[in-house]
Image: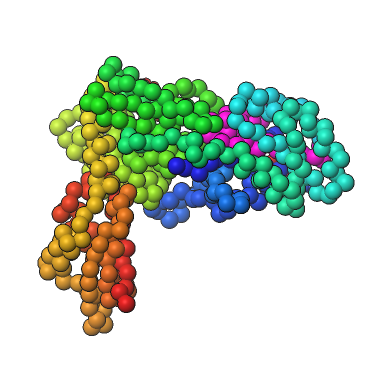
Amino acid sequence: MAAPVVAIVGRPNVGKSTIFNRMAGERIAIVEDQPGVTRDRLYAPAEWLNYEFRMIDTGGIELGDEPFLAEIRAQVELALDEADVIVMVTSGREGVTSADEVVAKMLYKTDKPVVLAVNKVDNPEMRQDIYDFYSLGLGEPYPVSGSHGLGLGDLLDEVVKNFPDEAAEQEDDGAIRFSIIGRPNVGKSSIVNAILGEERVIVSDIEGTTRDAIDTRFVTPEGDEFIMVDTAGMRKRGKVYENTEKYSVMRALKAIDDSNVVLMVLDAEAGIREQDKHVAGFAHEAGRAMIIVVNKWDAIEKDDHTMKDFENLIRAEFKFLDYAPIVFVSAKTGQRLDRLPQMIMDVDANHRKRISSSTLNDVIMDAIAVNPTPTDNGRRLRVYYATQVAVQPPTFVIFVNDVELMHFSYERFLENKIREAFDFTGTPIKLIVRARK
Ligand code: GDP
Ligand code: GDP
């Protein structure tokens, strides 16, 4: 389903970022709805030959004052968890160092393919010296020069050769794929464990091809099947990098990519933070169905306004998510967790909903009758016809006389009318305005 992931690891200063930047296309920025917010860049789409893949930027996991060994460890753990192919970078200028040996040793325990690059081999004479690198026990060393762009083709040939076989990928057979995202400590693992720990829920891990079992398939007592995306990391805990903000954002982005329905968890005790908005914005832009889950509802003092007040706060802070239903739960007491499967099925059904053109056009024409189309310099917007062109998310094309005449506010009005007429709870919908020739 998702493109393979490549991670670059190695001790500091060998040229990882230089190689990353050479291989990567433009990096994906986190979408935010406010200008001026720093854009974290974590993933980069890349391609080689006919292969599309994604590169994780494992650099810059910030661990404060931790020594660089801890930083390398975090980087390697991340690569081991997330990547399909790992590129270990060393430097031909310095030769094999003890830090290289430490990195190599961490990589021995994985059965994921590791490709060894010897960087800073800027001229052909230096190629003699790379044989020492066989001693790292990671197979053939590939000489490259990140700064001169040499040897990267051969390296990439080897990388793509090791991508998992698409044919071997697991079929989803109707199970709903969803993910649970949110900042560290909001209670994601607790929710996962509460759902999967329920006695009558039947759990089976999905064995990936080269990945560890990352997703979890389960069946509810009602017989409904779900695949919880990227659960492995939440079930076995205690990795160094897990609670870094950068990592948690990255994990969320990947989980969003891989799922149809996203459960965004907020912490009732801690309130709403900037990072919550970044990630929610990305899920919205990606067109995923979404449920907002407010956890730790047991932990706060409540009166009869508390729930409504919290809901108002969420609506004000996440204006673009006005379609997402909100549920207040406690992973600790289990309160309302039993509602989640049905909610996931409902928003998933809305996300896949198809509206016939005739019904859709009735709704649009009725809307126009109530609120006539805008005019500009005496010219009036004419809406000829609307039709649904896609699902997940539902996407509608509206044919008009002149695209310029369609104002944002009128588009919004039409979207609201569509939402009033059909239940699209939990899913974004897209309107595309086209001029009819
Ligand atoms: P990182 O810490 O592993 O990400 O390393 P960087 O990509 O930041 O590079 C460290 C230093 O090595 C920088 O000064 C780069 O300019 C330099 N460098 C990177 N690639 C090459 C190369 O192929 N040849 C030479 N001579 N220097 C390089
Ligand atoms: P994650 O980092 O999002 O996976 O969060 P965890 O599941 O590890 O939970 C973080 C902390 O919040 C732990 O100390 C949990 O015991 C606590 N916690 C999780 N859910 C609840 C809840 O519903 N109520 C209360 N009171 N504490 C919770």
Viewer can see residue 275: no
- Whether residue 164 appears in magenta in the rendering, the answer is no
Residue found 42% across the figure and 30% down from its top: 215
In the displayed orientation, state which residue is furthest to the front. 167
Q: Position of residue 303 (x, y in %)?
A: 17, 30
In the image, residue 154 above or below residue 9: below
Say left or right for 293 vs 229. left
In the image, residue 291 above or below residue 336: below
* Part of the protein shown in magenta: 65-94
Q: Position of residue 337 (x, y in %)?
A: 25, 27
In the displayed orientation, state which residue is furthest to the bottom. 378
Residue found 84% across the figure and 43% down from its top: 127
Judge by depth and name the residue closer to the eye, 61 or 79.
79
- Whether residue 93 appears in magenta in the rendering, the answer is yes
Q: Identify the image quadrant of residue 54.
A: top right
Say left or right for 294 vs 282. left
Q: How is the image coloured?
A: rainbow
Q: Position of residue 200 (x, y in %)?
A: 27, 18
Q: Identify the image quadrant of residue 85.
A: top right
Viewer can see residue 49: yes
Residue found 43% across the figure and 28% down from its top: 206
Quadrant location, the C terminus = bottom left
Residue found 47% across the figure and 22% down from its top: 237
Q: Position of residue 287 (x, y in %)?
A: 35, 49
In the displayed orientation, state which residue is furthest to the top. 199
Ligand 2: give its quadrant.
top left
